Amino acid sequence: MKLVANSSSALRGIAPIPGDKSCSHRALILGALANGTTRITGLLGSDDVLATARAVAALGATVKHVGPGEWQVTGSRWTTPAEPIDCGNSGTAARLLLGACAGVEGLTVTLTGDQSLSKRPMQRVTAPLERMGAKFDGGDHLPITVHGQALGAIHHLNIPASAQVKSALLLAGVTSGAAVSVKEPLASRDHSEIMLGEFGNPLTGCDIAIASDPSSAAFPLVAAAIVPGSEVTVRGLLVNPLRTGLYEVLEQMGGAIALTNEQLQSGEIVADLTLRHAPLQPCHVTAANVPAMIDEIPALAVACAYADGESVIEGLAELRVKESDRLGAIVAGLVACGVAAIADGDALRIFGRGTVRGGGKVVTHGDHRIAMAFLTLGLASEQPVEVDQAEMIATSFPNFVEVMQGLGAHIEEVA
């Protein structure tokens, strides 16, 4: 399915953003390991998260969908499933399950994925798990077979800072009872630590309310930043300090941001965020700030394209091993739309001129965030912007098009 975005009038309204993807995966996995029943509200019903729901059900948990965004998970001891577990396109599902399964003695399970996931590196997770005594059949890519073992303690230096690696080790510690210590030079997302606190020790079923995903909210909010006259609000947004990097940079660039109604929800800070259009200035983002916005870099690149001057974003080596070579895809898409941009080592340099020609046919390489980013870029460009694939948007933001159209965005399917 191809989509095209056309220049739009002012975008206005409240953008209903689905639940945070990172928290949704973790709620399902911890609920499946816990004693008793966990009630989850706001769960993201995307392809990636549903893959995790099917996985924990195959491992022995009872998983029930009881209403929109509402799920119940009753934990049990995990047992060997009848068939391999398909993680679809979800790197989070695969890496966290590698850790959780590694510490379940007697469990044998093979994890597989789609063509894209099967190209993504897994040894960053399996190597430290093997230091704990974990046993795997396979190499750096799926399929990988896990043979659950009694595991030993580990002190791991998490370089580069990766929440998925850290979470896999923590889950291995939970299922095996082994002591796990992780040190990071830069802080990665701490949703696992926060949610483990909610479940307690030992893990006990609880109520988990999941906030709106800041990575999905990035697209309608950046659209508001670049389309003149726009004002968009997201309610109940996850504003964990390790996830707000994009919004801090947008504010530094001149974006008019207002944060209201801050509160604590299931251990996480949430708030309502409103962004109004304002002329944007270029930015310089250092590597130390990237972990707080790693999934939002495509959206930030769109904002930089509309800033007047050179923007630099450093420390982007991790983008080379996302759903696509995301750094290369960003540069190619910007150039196709008339924006001068280069990848300078692991840095992205964008030479904005305040306006964007557009007119490009962007190759997404099956990457949901590349598709959404360039559809966002097309909402303020002089000529329409087309993306070659859009089906994969459902992995993280199933109703993206409807949400954007509800704000006034001109996005439509083309033959």
Image (cartoon, rainbow, N blue to C red):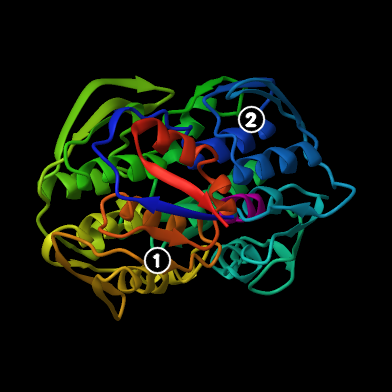
- Tell me the residue at 61%/46% (across/down): 48
Give the mark nearest the N terminus, 1 or 2: 2
Q: Which residue is mark 1?
A: 159
How many C-alpha atoms fall within 10 Å of the one at disc 2: few (<14), some, or many (≥20)? Answer: many
User: Which region is colored magenta?
Assistant: 91-98
Residue 31 shows which numbered tag?
A: 2
Is 175 on the left-hand or right-hand side of 201? right
Could you tell me what secondary structure mostly forms the magenta stretch? helix
271 on left or right of 84: left
- Name the residue furthest right: 82
211 left or right, relative to 173:
left
Around disc 1, counting alpha carbons within 10 Å, would you say few (fewer than 14), some (14 to 19), or many (20 or more)? few
Question: Tag 1: residue type?
Answer: Ile
- Which quarter of the picture shows residue 235? top left
Give the structural element (helix, strand or loop) at label 2: helix
Q: Is residue 329 magenta?
A: no
Frontmost residue, 150 versus 100:
100
Q: Is residue 174 above or below residue 180?
A: above
In the displayed structure, 250 sits above or below 348; it is: above
Residue 200 locus on image (x, y percent): 53, 26
Identified at 43% across, 34% down, the residue is: 403
Q: Position of residue 82 (x, y in %)?
A: 90, 48
Checking the image for residue 359, the label placed there is: none
Q: Nearer the viewer, residue 334 or 23?
A: 334
The residue positioned 74% from the left and 40% from the top of the image is 54
Quarter the C terminus occupies: bottom right
Relative depth, front residue between 12 and 159: 12
Q: Position of residue 231 (x, y in %)?
A: 22, 32
* Quadrant of res 407: top left
Quadrant of the rendering where the N terminus is positioned? bottom right
**Tag 2: residue type?**
Gly
Helix, strand or loop at mark 1? loop
